[in-house]
Image (tube, rainbow, N blue to C red):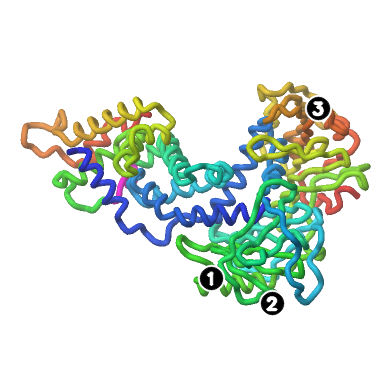
């Protein structure tokens, strides 16, 4: 009796017409998810703010992918870049809807993304661009296939049909995205604030906005520079950046999380689909917050206080997920910065203490003092 | 980093958004809190997208995340304060003590989160005891006991209140009856 009444009550509640539109923002959910992913993996990796660099990079590294055959048919104009620079955004919006501004972005050698958001925090757009040859449209034109970067996994995007060209470049619809070849051999995906049960293709206003954004999207070397909170003397020519994540802050785009790879760096795959670079420096550097911490009490590490180049730092040694050896140097308030380096593997190429002592110069919490050329 | 990760995720959750909202509405009792719950659930699904994709029953996984998010949220003092001071359910302005349905709704809303979730899984999602146990991460026996306690609480809430006064006298507004005590103890 009471069970049936409860069933009826639940059915009646669920059967009501929900208020529309839903107050659920998928773009916001993705952004929140990315942020949680970084910090969640930071906790797994050791519980320090420094580990956030590693996990942000991991987030970038766990790319699903599928091997492709090559670029699609040629389009007019110069070819797409074959590699993306980690010192710039590699893409810029020539036009955005009113009230929209850049939120965050990321770069790996063959892929760059950027999210924009409205001043209200909802209804944003996101774009991914891929380097020349990274993706191709399958012969049946049903999928955009992209090999992963770094390698591993599978990936393809289901296309739902041909779309009108974007500034003369061939284009396709996926369920919720506009996909187009922004330059010969280079593909882009634009995701908009499409609501429940809708497609970008079938929403005239959003579709028009998408085309205007896409037509004005620029990809190439003449795009905004990122700024870095540190210089790395003595590394030029031997180390390179990858898996960089940047955020908008006071009119700047600050690269606060990235990996420095050496010739000895190797990608180590872990259970669960994640991966780590060994013999690489996972770096995080951002303006310090009052509550920044290095979590020296992490039970999985041995922590030691040191003073290097005048900065009070923690050096921590332990293991991370997958029982991979890690060492870390961390300064929660190092000259106005929260800064750290983490290395994985039993025999790191340099070692975090020596790396910090010999190859790191912190530039302080004032963004005006940060550099666009951290290896210079 | 991949656009396709986002695309797959977006396509999946967009297709399930309606059902997730309705389940959240049944759990929460109002659409505003339901949408808040779905929003936080979607962020978690993004974090665990690899597991969702790999799951044999991705929808069951998503439902489990939502239910756990509901229980977690209801455990917090914030949720209790909001429930007690704000609108608990979508409630018409009728005299609630004369409407058995509204009494029932209030009684269910007053249940501890885990008991309420158990009832929702059993009587809205039509899961059996074992399936409900899998979602809640507890034993089948716990599901049975939680269900029994919940039903008993609802029955008692719908019956005459112990201090309702002389027999036959109105018991007072259902919301007052339900919420004057401790609202939730998980």
Q: Chain of mark 1?
A: A
What range is drawn magenta here? B85-90
- Residue beneath disc 1: A201
> How many neighbours does mark 1 have within 10 angstroms: few (below 14), some (14-19), or many (20 or more)?
many
Q: Chain of mark 2?
A: A
The location of residue A13, given as percent across then percent down, is 29, 50
Residue A233 quadrant: top right
State how far apart marks 1 and 3 are (Cα): 51 Å
The earlier-in-sequence mark between 2 and 1 is 2
- Residue beneath disc 3: A346
The location of residue A14, given as percent across then percent down, is 32, 51
Are labels 2 and 1 assigned to the same chain? yes
The location of residue B96, given as percent across then percent down, is 18, 46
The earlier-in-sequence mark between 3 and 2 is 2
The location of residue A141, given as percent across then percent down, is 63, 67
Q: Residue at x 20, y 41 (%)?
A: B174
Are labels 1 and 3 assigned to the same chain? yes
- Residue beneath disc 2: A167
State how far apart marks 2 and 1 are (Cα): 17 Å
Comparing A259 with A257, the one in front is A259
Q: What label sits on residue B15 in the rendered view?
A: none
Q: Residue at x 36, y 37 (%)?
A: B117
Q: Is residue A142 above or below residue A15?
A: below
């Amino acid at each position: 009796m009471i069970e049936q009444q409860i069933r009826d009550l639940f059915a009646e509640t669920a059967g009501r017409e929900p208020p529309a539109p839903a107050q659920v923002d998928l773009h916001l959910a993705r952004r929140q998810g990315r942020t949680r992913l970084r910090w969640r993996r930071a906790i797994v990796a050791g519980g320090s703010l420094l580990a956030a660099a590693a996990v942000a990079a991991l987030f970038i590294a766990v790319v699903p992918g599928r091997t492709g055959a090559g670029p699609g048919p040629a389009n007019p104009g110069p070819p797409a870049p074959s590699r993306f620079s980690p010192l710039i955004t590699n893409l810029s919006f020539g036009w955005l809807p009113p009230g929209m501004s850049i939120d965050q972005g990321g770069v790996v050698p063959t892929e760059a993304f950027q999210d924009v958001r409205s001043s209200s925090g909802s209804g944003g757009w996101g774009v991914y661009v891929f380097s020349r040859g990274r993706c191709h449209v399958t012969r049946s034109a049903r999928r955009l296939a992209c090999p992963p970067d770094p390698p591993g996994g599978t990936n393809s995007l289901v296309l739902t049909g041909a779309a009108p060209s974007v500034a003369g470049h061939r284009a396709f619809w996926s369920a919720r995205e506009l996909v187009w070849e922004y330059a010969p051999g280079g593909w882009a995906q634009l995701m908009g604030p499409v609501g429940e049960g809708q497609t970008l293709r079938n929403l005239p206003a959003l579709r028009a906005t998408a085309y205007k954004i896409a037509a004005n999207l620029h990809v190439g070397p003449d795009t905004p520079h990122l700024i870095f909170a540190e210089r790395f003397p003595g590394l030029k020519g031997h180390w390179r950046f990858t898996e960089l994540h940047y955020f908008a802050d006071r009119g700047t785009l600050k690269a606060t999380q990235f990996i420095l790879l050496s010739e000895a760096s190797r990608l180590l795959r872990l259970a669960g689909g994640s991966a780590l670079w060994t013999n690489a420096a996972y770096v995080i550097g951002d303006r310090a917050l009052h509550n920044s911490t290095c979590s020296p009490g992490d039970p999985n590490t041995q922590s030691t206080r040191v003073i290097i180049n005048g900065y009070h730092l923690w050096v921590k040694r332990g293991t991370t997920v997958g029982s991979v050896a890690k060492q870390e140097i961390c300064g929660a308030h190092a000259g106005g910065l929260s800064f750290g380096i983490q290395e994985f593997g039993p025999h790191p190429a340099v070692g975090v203490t020596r790396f910090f002592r010999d190859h790191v110069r912190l530039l302080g919490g004032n963004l005006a003092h940060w550099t666009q050329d951290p290896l210079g | 980093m991949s656009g396709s990760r986002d695309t797959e995720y977006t396509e999946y959750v967009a297709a399930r958004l309606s059902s997730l909202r309705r389940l959240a509405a049944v759990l929460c009792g109002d659409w505003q809190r339901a949408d808040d719950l779905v929003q936080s659930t979607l962020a978690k699904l993004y974090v665990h997208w690899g597991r969702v994709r790999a799951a044999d029953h991705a929808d069951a996984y998503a439902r489990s995340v939502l239910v756990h998010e509901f229980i977690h949220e209801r455990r917090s003092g914030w949720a209790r304060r909001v429930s007690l001071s704000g609108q608990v359910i979508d409630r018409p302005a009728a005299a609630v003590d004369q409407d058995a349905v509204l009494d029932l709704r209030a009684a269910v809303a007053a249940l501890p989160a885990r008991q309420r979730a158990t009832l929702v899984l059993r009587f809205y999602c039509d899961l059996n005891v074992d399936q409900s146990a899998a979602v809640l991460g507890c034993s089948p026996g716990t599901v049975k006991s939680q269900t029994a306690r919940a039903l008993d609480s609802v029955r008692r809430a719908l019956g005459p209140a112990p201090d309702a006064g002389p027999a036959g006298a109105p018991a007072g507004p259902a919301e007052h009856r339900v919420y004057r005590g401790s609202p939730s103890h998980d």
